[in-house]
Image (tube, helix red, strand yellow):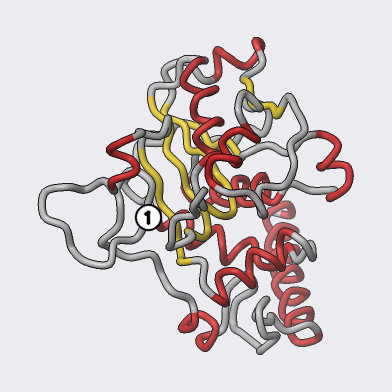
Amino acid sequence: MENSTQIVNFTQAKLLAGRVLEFLLPSRCPCCGAKIECHGFLCGRCWGDLVPLASPYCERCALPFEFEIEGESECGACIKDQPAFDWARAAVSYDELGRSLVFRLKYSGATSVVPAMAQMMALAVTGKKIDVIVPVPLHRWRLLRRRFNQSALLGHAIAKRIDVPNDNFILKRRKSTVSQGELGKKARYRNVASAFVVPKEKVADVKGKHVLLVDDVLTTGATVHECARALKRAGAASVGVVTFARVGRPIAG
């Protein structure tokens, strides 16, 4: 009886402490700073400024279509050269606010945006068969400079929302590459060619599994294509991709 009373008292104290903290430090929108009811989400105005990635889009790479296309569900590029991943989804288009959220996380270390981003990404993969979540890895030198891997943060948060294991060590980036940002499409594929591998000790964790690969932005698909190749070589049954944002226009070159 005494233990039960102690548990109740502790719970009440915890709730009271939470209310006091909420009063002193109210939840705020990670984009604009406006007060919100629940930590980790966006205010109504910022939520409305996002452009959700909605149908029609390529079922393989999530590239938006301008018009509904009867019969074909894949874009011309995927039909011509199929990516190694089986499907891709993204939460929003890479427009002003979507780009801003990615930049705030990736370059400013604003981890307060992770819960909102992960919630939208989790919704984007509803109904998909997923056994394990794997973030796109950074090379160790870039990880030391940045101090965190934004894809790993997103993957961990998504895993909690959809109740699927997350493993940051299934994929390894075995060579350092230059930033993809200023490269054309062909150069991007050359840049990351053979850059990823599944370590021998992790092959058993991949074989026969439906893998969800997590990254922040999908542009040409070069990076996730190489990651998927490595996962398929290790025996993955399928590889899906989810990113927060999808660039809406193909990059030339």
Up-down relation of residue 149 to residue 203 (above or below)? below
Dot 1: element:
loop
Residue 132 vs residue 66, the one in the foreground = 66
Q: Is residue 181 left or right of residue 184?
A: right
Residue at the limit of the structure toward the front, as seen here: 253
Which residue is at a point 79% across and 48% down the rendered structure image?
148
Estimate how packed mark 1 is, as few (under 14), some (14 to 19) or many (20 or more) residues with alpha carbons within 10 Å: many
Q: In the rendering, at what x and y percent does residue 16 appear?
A: 74, 77
Residue at the limit of the structure toward the left, as seen here: 70
Q: In the rendering, at what x and y percent does residue 13 appear?
A: 76, 70
Which residue is at a point 32% across and 65% down the rendered structure image?
54
Which residue is at a point 30% across and 57% down the rendered structure image?
57
Which residue is at a point 66% across and 47% down the rendered structure image?
180
**Residue 43: quarter of image:** bottom right
- Going by the numbered disc 1, the residue's amino acid type is Leu
Up-down relation of residue 247 to residue 15 (above or below)? above
**Residue 41: quarter of image:** bottom right
Q: Is residue 210 left or right of residue 21?
A: left
**Residue 250: quarter of image:** bottom left
Q: Is residue 197 left or right of residue 70?
A: right
Q: In the rendering, at what x and y percent does residue 160 appear?
A: 56, 48
Up-down relation of residue 189 to residue 249 (above or below)? above
Q: In the rendering, at what x and y percent does residue 231 appear?
A: 52, 23
Total numbered labels: 1
Residue 241 vs residue 177, the one in the foreground = 177
Please name the residue that numbered disc 1 is placed on: 63
